Amino acid sequence: MTKEPSPKKENFVNVFLEEVSRSSLTIIVLAIFTGFLLGGILAAGTTPEIYDAFEVSFGKGISESLKLIWETYSSLLMGSFGNPSKMIAAVASGETKALQAAFKPFLESLVVTTPYIFTGVAVALGFQAGVFNIGAEGQLYMGAIMAAWAGWTFKGLPPIVHVPLALAVGTLTGFVWGFIPGWLKAKTGAHEVINTIMMNYIAFNFSEYLIRGPFEDPETPFKTRFIEESAHLYRFFEGTSLRLHIGLFIALAVAVIIWYILYKTTWGFEFRSVGLNPYASKYAGINSSWVTILALSLSGAISGLAGAVEMLGVNFRQTQALSTGYGFDAIAIALLANNHPLLCIITAILFGFLRHGSRVMQINTGIPIDIISILQAFIIFFIAAPAIIRTIYRLKEPKPANEPV
Amino acid sequence: MSNQIQKKEKIIREKPENLRQVIMGALFLLIALFIGFVFIRTTDTLMTTTFVMTPGGSKATLPDLVFNTRAALIAISALCAILGVYQLIKGFGKATNWILGFVGILLTTSFLAWGAGGGSINVGGMLRVAIMRSVPIVLGAFSGILCERVGVTNIAIEGMMITGALVGSMFGSLFGLWTGVIAAIISGGLTGSIHAMLSIKYKVNQIISGTIINIFTVGLTSYIVTKILQVAEWQYLNQSGFFPSYSIPLLSKIPFLGPIFFSHNMFVYAMYLLVGILTFALFHTRWGLRLRAVGEHPKAADTLGINVFRTRYLVVILGGMMAGFAGSYFSLGSLGYFEQVMSAGRGFIGLAAMIFGKWTPVGSLGAGLLFGFAESLSTNLSILRFPIPAELLLMVPYILTMVILAGVVGRSQGPAATGVPYEKESL
């Protein structure tokens, strides 16, 4: 009997998950390696000095290129982790100030990692339920600005009330921002990819309006007011330039909670089964449109919380709307983590450190931060099409797994 | 008895249509009431509105249209009410969508008349800008049509456009505008071939593949801008300038309409041409029939000896070239240089235009013009009597996209095999 192709379209997340489950850790490591290699070639290829070196001799060109790639990635690493010799010296001396200075890059990378954990988990949650949330960026934005609003509007509250209140406002805003495309998908079939992107643009323009209009600080144009002291998140090194705040642990908690919901509760089971096969789930009595709405709304809520935490922990005010990129990078974080919330923590750390390190890299080597997006694209490219990696490195085809996931 | 059952069946069958008829009728009446209560109540009896009918770019003009604002609003409101009542009682049937569009135009006109009350607004210029703004959206929709008709979802149009815009600007600066356009088309074709390879050969999920291309192209273009184009000594690479506009003899002399439609640069005329070419190619040639067969039922097409893979490759690359051409409009057709993320979601709006236009070139042109008008409107509204902040107006095209996708105008169905990789069976 021949297999009839199913007339209904297969769920793309399902197909993708299956693809990833077949690829081993080797593939992931090789994908990251190859991504970095190609990124290095690109960096060398766009630097005029390299061409000058090649004009001198081929060997010099190659050595200059290697030197540039080494410098790029070593300053990337130094920027993200810190200088190891400084660290050792600081530990040896035992001085608080020296310690803080030496470990600052590392701790700051953790600050950048925090929103990545949130948004990565948010996008992964959507994927698990079969929806593609590209709107994390806009949800984060709206969450941030509304949390800021709650941060300065309520005055005289004790921090124990004010902080959760502002976080809740941000979360709720993100929830609404995710609910709209979710509801539209469930009720009208409008594709969530296009709608979440449209919601991003609406969020940018709307927050721009708020910043220049009702939320504008009378004293400094194009910026919102500062939030009240009582709405600040607890910082571990108050009084220093280290910004590490309690938000990191909120993010870790959210990742664990989402993992628990997805893998240990009936809700989570329904989420995952709709993601794997919406038709079978429907047949089994699962309300798949409800799952779609809830998944996108929850995903939006987590991204909104990310924005709120960023606002209360790091920024304290919203300046002109510029894309932070946290929401877009989240797609790569979730895909690299195979949409597992706990693995998202690891991949978020990877991207957080890359991002923070890339700032130092740009200053030292003049390679723009945008190379991080290019690296991401390469990495997802190779993970999505492992056959390419297998061809390059002559890996054997793995046996197709009988049981997906 | 059996007659009664038949009647009952008929009612059950027609229920959704009836519901739609009632909803549409109610909507028309609501619009009439809205114009009555919001616009007319806030307008003086003696106030006049001036619609300037000079689109610019040509000497053919119409005299300005000066009218009493309140009287015009009352007339429009009454017309909407009549249409609503007729729709409720009898229904326009298949013409409902056209009537809906007409009521939309009436609402917009009344809004403009009200907003510009006591002053003037250049309607001609606004329509002319609408045509220009619709170019990338319509061409993007064409790219979507080609890809989806052959069975490949293409959400990478945005990325292909931004590539085309950058390449167009760089090559345009170096070797002249036409070379820039050709280079942009080729670069779009290359990005298209990556999408084709990933989604046809490697069977990567097409949404993921599109996202990869979008992330990559946005990253790469921003990288090149920061690393190269912003450096003073390389800035000459990003000064292409743009195509001058050219008034078609005779046609551009038509009063009012001439300058709106026939006094533009090359891109607008290319858009007109492509509508015809694409419609003919898709629906009146053997090539088009084969292409559509591959998109609807690849297995059947394969059985008949059509090479499914080759057709898909070719058409997706062609779609990429179309998107690259659309992208070059941003730099070579309007701004004269490349700016980071200058396509601002037009690729996605193009997809919405494609869906709204039911996967046909003519329909997408109509939808694209609508989006173009929304953009043109949003840039013009700040001069009205009740200024609305520009940031809020910029949201209009995006909201309109969502509303249209949600199917206010009825659901539409795309080609059956879109998004499904084709697997050839081994014997």
Image: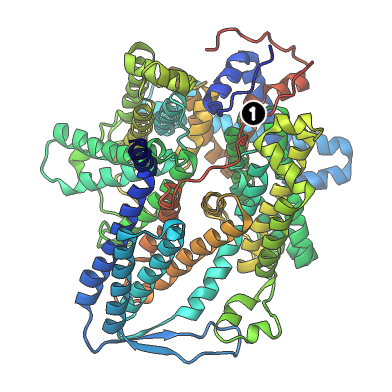
Q: Position of residue A317 (x, y in %)?
A: 30, 48
Letter of the chain that mark 1 sits on in the rendering:
B
Q: Secondary structure at mark 1?
A: loop
Instruction: Answer with left or right where residue B427 lies relative to residue A291.
Output: right
Q: Position of residue A235 (x, y in %)?
A: 29, 31
Quarter of the image with the C terminus of chain B is: top right
Which of A108 and B401 lies nearest the eye of the viewer? B401
Amino acid type at circle 1 is: Val
In the figure, B83 relative to A284: above or below? below
Pointer 1 residue:
B204
Which of A330 and B305 lies nearest the eye of the viewer? B305
Residue B361 quadrant: bottom right
Residue A190 quadrant: top left
Residue at 53% in and 26% down: A11
Which of A79 and A2 lies nearest the eye of the viewer? A2
Residue at 25% in and 36% down: A167
In the figure, A221 relative to A60: above or below? below
